[in-house]
Image (cartoon, rainbow, N blue to C red):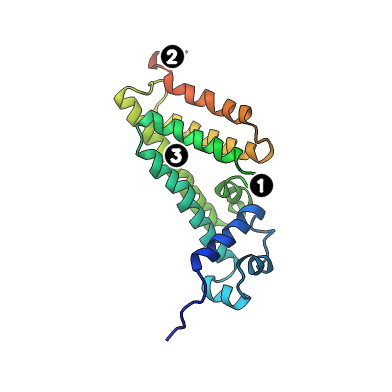
Amino acid sequence: MARPREFDEEAVLDAALQRFWSHGYEATSVRDLIARTGLTAASLYNAFGDKRSLYEKSLSRYVGGSVDERIRRCSALPAREALRAFFAEIVERSLGDRDHKGCMVVNAALEVAPHDAEFRKAIAATLVRIETFFRDRVAAGQADGTIGRALPPEALARHFLGVLMGVRVLARARPERALLEGVVAPALALLDMPAREAGA
């Protein structure tokens, strides 16, 4: 019979997540993970596999607790409010990131995805979920009249995704409220454009 684990698996994952998030995949060694989690190398490998497997679990935990949770929370709001709340939270989260860690999904997209097809697929799927949230909220707002019809939901969703990525990257080097809100504001202004301005 297998012996019960003598550690809190979620606490260990959180510790590994924080290390990967703040330092990245390549700059995090197994020795760093051992120091951060307090586990022995044997316990770490037995419980989570190799470094790549632990990174995969950490990234999945981040997505579930950050990205997916924000989408669930904002999806419960009226369409227009959902989009404004989403970006307001992103700006506040970026400004409150004292260590300038940024978004772990964006970090992984830049560092790991170009060299690992499996991670590229997983990160792309997360970005598609975000884009789908934007598209669905825009479509709902256009249907109830709270969002203008200047652009189709698909176009606005792609634009919002690009703005989101830009804000998260900018905040790593220039976490300035005026800058980040200045990037978001013109994008949200598109919600007010009536259909007659689409071809202007």
| Residue type at the position of mark 3 | Glu
Which residue corresponds to the image point at 66% horizontal and 47% vertical from the top-left?
99
**Image x and y of residue 30, in percent:** 66, 68
Using the image, determine if residue 42 lies above or below residue 33. below
The reply to whether the C-beta atoms of the residues labelled 2 and 1 are less than 8 Å apart is: no
Q: Going 53% across and 25% down the picture, which residue do you hit? A: 185
Quadrant in the picture for residue 96: top right
Q: Earlier in the sequence, mark 3 or mark 2?
A: 3
Locate the N terminus by quadrant: bottom left
Along the horizontal axis of the image, is 83 left or right of 165?
Answer: left
Horizontal side of residue 41 vs 122, given as left or right: right
> Quick check: marks 3 and 1 in contact, CB under 8 Å?
no
Position of 49 relative to 21 (above/below): below
Residue position marked by numbered label 2 in the rendering:
197
List the residue tagged with mark 3.
Answer: 131
Q: Is residue 153 visible?
A: no
**Residue 135 coordinates in the image, percent (x, y):** 40, 35
Query: Mark 3, residues whose alpha carbon is within 10 Å: few (<14), some, or many (≥20)?
Result: many
Task: Say what secondary structure mark 3 lies in.
Answer: helix
Q: Nearer the viewer, residue 10 or 143?
A: 10
Task: Measure the C-alpha gap from mark 2 to mark 1.
Answer: 42 Å
Amino acid carrying mark 1 in the image: Asp
Q: Residues within 10 Å of mark 2 (few under 14, many from 20)?
A: few
Determine the image quadrant of residue 16: bottom right
Measured as percent of width and height from the top left, residue 44 is found at: 58, 73
Report the Cα–Cα distance between label 3 and label 2. Answer: 24 Å
Tell me: 117 left or right of 29. Answer: left
